[in-house]
Amino acid sequence: MSLIKLIPSALAILAASTVIASARDQLQIAGSSTVLPYATIVAEAFGENGEFKTPVVEGGGSGAGRKKLCEGVGESTIDIANSSSRISQSDIDLCKTNGVTDIMEVRIGYDGIVFASDINGPDFVLTPVDVFNAIGGTVAKDGALVANTAKTWADANAALPAQDILTFIPGTKHGTREVFDTKVLLEGCKTNGAYDLFLAASTAAEEADKKKDAEKQCFTTRSDGTAVDIDGDYTETLSRIAANKNAVGVFGLSFYENNTDKLKVATVNGIVPSVETISKGEYPVSRPLYFYVKKAHIGVIPGLKEYIAFFVSDDMAGPGGALADYGLVPDPELAATQAAVEAETVMGPLQ
Amino acid sequence: MTAPISLKGSPLHPRAAIDTRASLLLQDPRTKARNATEKRFRAYGLSAIVVALLALVWLLVSIFGNGLPAFRQTFMTIPVTLDAALLDKGGKRDPADLSKATTVAYGKLLAASLGAEITAKGIDLGGMDAKALAKMISEESPATLRNRVLADPSLIGTTINFTLLASGRIDGYYKGRVSMESAALDKNTSPEQLAMADKLKAAGVLSTSFNTGFMTMPDASDKRPEAAGLGVAIVGSLYMMFVVLALALPIGVATSVYLEEFAPKNNFTDLIEVNIANLAAVPSIVYGILGLSIFINFAGLPQSAPIVGGLVLTLMTLPRIIIPTRAALKAVPPSIRDAALGIGASRLQTITHHVLPLAMPGILTGTIIGLAQALGETAPLLLIGMVAFVRDFPGAPPEGLFDPASALPVQIYNWTQRGDPGFVERASGAIIVLLVFLIAMNAVAIYFRRKFERRW
């Protein structure tokens, strides 16, 4: 066969395959690895009870998922992006340039972030300032900023066990790190007094830039091996704790709840993390979880609206539902979310 | 003119050889040193092998130690009365009515049946309520029962013997993963449940047997590690290997034959040759990026589909097939070509009748090893959406090639990231399955090489 004949026939095969491909009847979901277990639980239950196929759920991270959502409208793009942090303006702009204008924001509940150590180790009663005193890069001591030299937890707070400081914290690519930074390190930094000193020492001209500078300083952890960034997932943190029995790791509440036989959880501000204490707002370190839906696909991809409604239904995301059973903290405003999903409300501009 | 360097006294001196004490039995210092060097070198080699073997043994022991339990599973067999009042409220066996009874209803039915069976066997329930009983049963089992009833509505109203999966924690108890002490700390189970499981085992209701579901069932969510299987992953991997074989073998062989037998030797063919050698060394994730932009973004093929995975792996495998195929063609002696041409065969006849058959063992070996490499590849699949939770089996080919599917290495990767400790054994079990596939493929390659090998 000559080359001239070959090229059109190859193209014809490609075209034919595109025709077969254009009948997608399965939802495509991607995004946060924190939301992934919840999404798979819902997808599984959705697939086995409904008339629709089980959605395909991918991980890959919140940022990657939102970027995929914003690639455009059409069958070869995903329908839902799971996200453990709120969508950013740059994502919305990217969506707009690619023709994805209507996005529905669905908040599914809250995720608690807990400190846990080996089950046979001592109890930890932490406060944000203890954590900052233990792993903050520069701390305030007697009104002056000094490099952190605390060796044991007792150095950070005399009430804590005299155990060498070793912490496994989520790496910077994780959404969890953002919450850890703002809810633990920054809080501790402010209580410690380092924040005000950072603010005073900042050379930036604008007040807002000064604050940004000070926050950045607060987020800087020690680089002497006491605060180890974990870029993998919680399973890696767990195996590192199994190898270093005197380490303290940061986990998601659901992960901890499935490994209670190996891990001992630390209280923060005297509150034991649990679905109840987080939903009451007593436990301080938590964050909302979301997913974002491409509205243009509702009515085009079969089962999309049914899946969203099923996800936020009381059986799944409600108190005592399948997701709460696994460790998701139910959203007290779930009824409003259900109504918004029913009305297919598109999200407004970010505040 | 400089004076010659004196060699007197050194073993290199010609006179040194004529040492009156020289004997084969007495080694001079130089020979001793040379022999010692050789001995040391042998010791280094041996210790290298020992280190490599130890690493292999360590790997195999840890994989098999963790993974073998995945091939056994704890089941309970109980009689279940499929009450029409519960499952068919309309009473007309109408499929639409039947599907209204969700897995929640079936779950309650199973928990009640288990409670009834426990009482029937004369075991004291010990204050376990329906919720605690439900925790002993895998959440997968209600779905299995529901599908069975939907497929055969005539079962409603009868009592069937139903084999259900025990929950992951009870299964872990019989595999040594869960103990009474750990259960006391675990919110997913309790020592009472484990004690009840022991009693049920004594009564013959509960037993641990070979787990066929591990090979046939699809992936399952974090809440049911006991139900997670490799079914979809094996089908997906098979489909991809089929695509790779169907595309990479003909393209690879045609390329090699043309380059080796027909193409003129000039700078351009040299450039192609260098490129092929380079492509074989390109990291596989690069092919994933290429596949994403060509097959998904440009050609509009669906995400997570074995066809796209197969195409990407084809690109990756091509140079790995072309290089050994060319080597095999080169190894055919020119005298065979000359003889064929000499008795009047055309060049195509020479190749198809003589050169290709003789090169076939080498080509097959290269192809199978290329396929084995493609089978174990995860990185390129990451970008085309195959590293995903896929629960529905893809359809029959050719349409099924376009349905979402998973793949074996991807399934291992996914399971290592799950929070439930039950998935550790599943991941290691999946590694064993993948290793068995790879060993089988390599064994076939060795068999072909041995069987058809020729020496000239």
Image (cartoon, grey):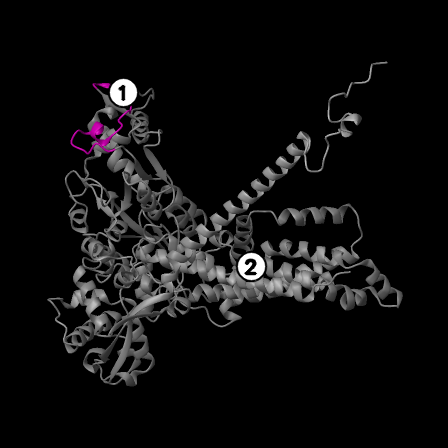
Residue at horizontal 56 percent and vertical 47 percent from the top: B283
Please identify the dominant SS of the magenta region: loop
Q: Residues within 10 Å of mark 1 (few under 14, many from 20)?
A: some
Badge 1 amino acid: Leu
Magenta stretch bounds: A142-163
Residue A14 disc label:
none
Residue that carries the numbered disc 1 in the rendered image: A145
Whether residue B138 sits left or right of residue B250 in the image: it is left
Is residue A84 visible in this depiction of the protein? yes
Where, quadrant-wise, is the N terminus of chain A in this rendering?
bottom right
Q: Nearer the viewer, residue B318 or B41?
A: B41
A148 magenta-colored: yes
Decide: is B263 above or below A183: below
Rendering coords of residue B371 (x, y %): 57, 60
Q: Residues within 10 Å of mark 2 (few under 14, many from 20)?
A: many
Which numbered mark, 1 or 2, is in the foreground of this view? Answer: 2
Decide: is A240 above or below B450: above
Distance from disc 1 to disc 2, alpha carbons, whole Å, reads 59 Å
Residue that carries the numbered disc 2 in the rendered image: B372
Secondary structure of the residue carrying numbered label 1: strand
Q: Nearer the viewer, residue B107 or B335?
A: B335
Rendering coords of residue B148 (x, y %): 32, 78
Residue at horizontal 89 percent and vertical 65 percent from the top: B342
